Amino acid sequence: MKVAIATPCPRRAVPLLLAAWLTVAPAAVLAQAQGGGVPAEAQPGPEGRLMDRVVAVIEGQVLTQSELEFETRVALVQRGAMQAAFAPLDDEALRGGLELVINVRLQVLSAERLEAFPAEQAEVEARVAGFRGRFESEEEFQAFLARSGADVKLLTEVLARRVRAERILDSRIRPRAQVSEAEVFRYFQQHSSEYPEGYAAVKTRLQAKLRKERYDLLTAQEVTELHSSAQVRRVAPFAREARR
């Protein structure tokens, strides 16, 4: 069975640091994992072999099939879909992974031009350790890297880009995503029948809700602006389909 990926949605592990396009939320994959949809013993067959063909060109930088598959698997494993470490990925998964990779790399390229927002080494090391710890053993972790044609250095580079992209996104959006108490109270008055427990009891929850909604809206605007000025060419058939 091939692994599919759902539409990206925000992570909750670090509140308001990541927006929809910066994470891959594999709802379908997680459901399969919980229900045993993907056999634990799944091994890469002929269709699982790495193909180093070009799938996209991002601001002049080539992205290959093997890079895309690896980064997509890393994102899925981070979300708890361990079957994605070894199971084949279908076109839907690769399309979702591609949009993740494009957005992260565009943000990082923008920061590099300004020599801004470096990734903190301690945080990157913590991400690597956390990723490694998701596997049942060091042998399984090394098997994942070997299956992907990768090593710890490449994994570190991938996670470092994501850490850096988080900082960039947060710096641009969080200040504009704040919600005043007046806005929260106005929302409560408009929906008071939904909150019979009273304003004081739900104030914090409503503030978080409105802040997240604003953050997501600003993120969508950021993505649109980012892509409008970027040179991105999707080459692979599944990649071109994503933009139709």
Image (cartoon, helix red, strand yellow):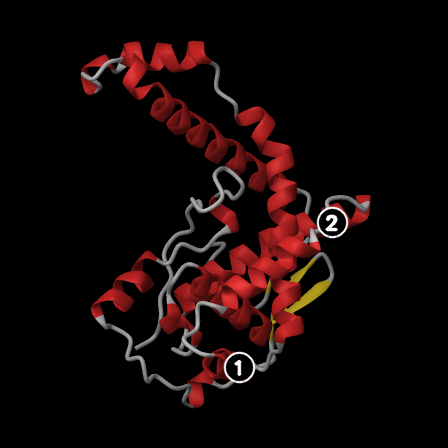
Q: Does the image show residue 226? A: no
Pinpoint residue 199: horizontal percent, then vertical percent: 29, 13
Placement of the N terminus among the 4 image quadrants = bottom left
Q: For residue 118, which numbered disc appears in the image? A: 2
Query: In this image, 88 relative to 160: left or right?
Result: left
Q: Nearer the viewer, residue 65 or 39?
A: 39
- In screen coordinates, is 27 left or right of 115? left
* Residue 72 visible in rendering: yes
Name above or below for residue 48 compared with residue 175.
below
Q: Residues within 10 Å of mark 1 (few under 14, many from 20)?
A: some
Q: Relative to 16, is 124 on the left or the right?
A: right
What is the count of numbered marks? 2
Residue drawn at the location 33% of the way across and 64% of the way down: 29
Q: Which mark is residue 142?
A: 1
Looking at the rendered structure, the secondary structure element under dot 1 is helix
Mark 2 element type: loop
Where residue 50 appears, as percent x and y from the top left, is 54, 83
Residue farthest to the bottom, as pictured: 46
Task: Compare marks 2 and 1 and give the one earlier in the sequence.
Answer: 2
What residue is at 70 percent from the left and 56 percent from the top? 121
Please indicate whether residue 43 sits to the left or right of residue 170 in the image. left
Q: Relative to residue 155, is residue 48 depicted above or below?
A: below
Name the quadrant containing residue 36.
Answer: bottom left
Give coordinates of residue 212: x percent, y percent: 44, 32
Q: Is residue 8 above or below residue 28?
A: above
Residue at image coords 59%, 71%: 67
Residue type at tag 2: Pro
Residue located 48% across and 32% down the image: 217
Q: Specify the quadrant of the image occupied by residue 197.
A: top left
